[in-house]
Amino acid sequence: MTWHILGAGSLGSLWATRLARVGLPVTLLLRDAERLAAYHDAGGLTLVENGREQRLAISAQTVDASDPIRRLLLACKAYDALAAVDAIAHRLTADAELILLQNGLGSQQQVTERLPGARCILASSTEGAYRDGPFRVVFAGRGTTWLGDPYHPAPPAWLAELTQAGIPHAWSDQIQSRLWRKLAINCAINPLTVLHDCRNGELDAHQDEVAGLCTELGGLLHACGQDEAAAGLFEEVQRVIQATAANSSSMRQDVGAGRRTEISYLLGHACAEGLRQGVPLPRLTALLQSLQAHLRARGLPDT
Ligand code: NAD
Ligand code: KPL
């Protein structure tokens, strides 16, 4: 069965090239005819791994092509997910399966509500990739992709294809908990690195702020029934800060490059959930407001 991959960006290309190079059928779904022409001009997708380059002439089409889609990897940013799914909804078969690679929370719910008949598998990835040119992806960080389906605990048979392609993965029966945990870690680290304009390790100088945020995030997680995701959160955040001390957080990289952030699906989602649950979150709310003002001042969207 063909892997349709929507979003030939960093993670989408990383998946597409690894699946295609072991001979599995892959089709890229590109936004429009102009991007499709640019892709053909590039001669395919190039994967840069351990300094070696491999170009793969993976088949591609525009999202509005007409052949049916039974398996879709949705590899766009969280803020693009709903519109992207809208663009291909008419092509999905009745038994279609989607893998949602988006970071944070909120976009998955938008997609599952838009496609009530489809199986939506949620993913949380610790792999790292970036683009160093059009239709080129650099494999920058080894990791794992956790996959799970909160409604149907049985793993899909195609996980074997991920193994065949060398894509590290694990099936999780607690995928919501993993997504919440990652969201909480991102909320405690990423906005502060933007506002203090610092690398992750420099947050050592702002331990009290980090601790205060973790206390509120822990309370929110408990209120959302995510006790496991709340356990030892501050210690885990400190561990991540040490382990990634030299790194710039993904949000700081986005702001530095003038790219839209996924704020609404990270800190924005946490604050919105606090309101829904009746949990006061004064520190997180103040942080969200400061971050939004910071983004506006740089001409970037604040959602
Ligand atoms: P990206 O911006 O590199 O790629 C997204 C691609 O989707 C872009 O090429 C964009 O043009 C395309 N796209 C958006 N809407 C589309 C549409 N309607 N039709 C066709 N194409 C469309 O993003 P990314 O870095 O690959 O991130 C994807 C998700 O994975 C994000 O939620 C991100 O937070 C998460 N993530 C990324 C990494 C990483 O290292 N890059 C790691 C972990 C998680
Ligand atoms: O996931 C991260 C990111 O940069 O998005 C880190 C910094 C590891 C934790 O927030």
Image (cartoon, rainbow, N blue to C red):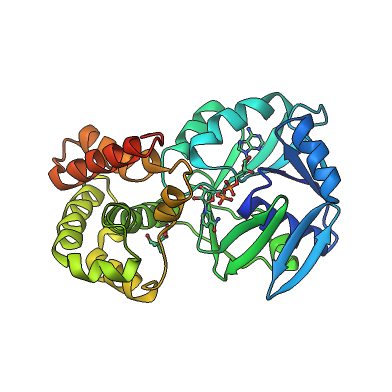
Could you say which quadrant of the image residue 39 lies in? top right
Pinpoint residue 227: horizontal percent, then vertical percent.
26, 56
The quarter of the rendered structure image containing the C terminus is: top left
Pinpoint residue 125: horizontal percent, then vertical percent.
52, 59
Q: Residue at the location (61% across, 26% down)?
A: 86
Residue closer to the observer: 21 or 286:
286
> In this figure, what is the number of numbered marks?
0
Q: Residue at the location (58% across, 53% down)?
A: 154
Left or right side of 201 for 141: right
Question: Compared to 270, does 233 lie above or below?
Answer: below
Left or right side of 86 for 29: right
Residue closer to the observer: 230 or 201:
201
Left or right side of 88 for 83: left
Residue closer to the observer: 219 or 303:
303
Could you say which quadrant of the image residue 269 lies in? top left
Q: Residue at the location (63% across, 56% down)?
A: 131
Q: Residue at the location (85% across, 45% down)?
A: 41
Q: Is residue 273 visible?
A: no
Q: Is residue 215 visible?
A: yes
Residue closer to the observer: 48 or 15:
48
Pinpoint residue 60: horizontal percent, then vertical percent.
81, 42
Question: Compared to 242, does 12 lie above or below?
Answer: above
Pinpoint residue 195: horizontal percent, then vertical percent.
27, 52
Toward the front, the furthest residue is 298
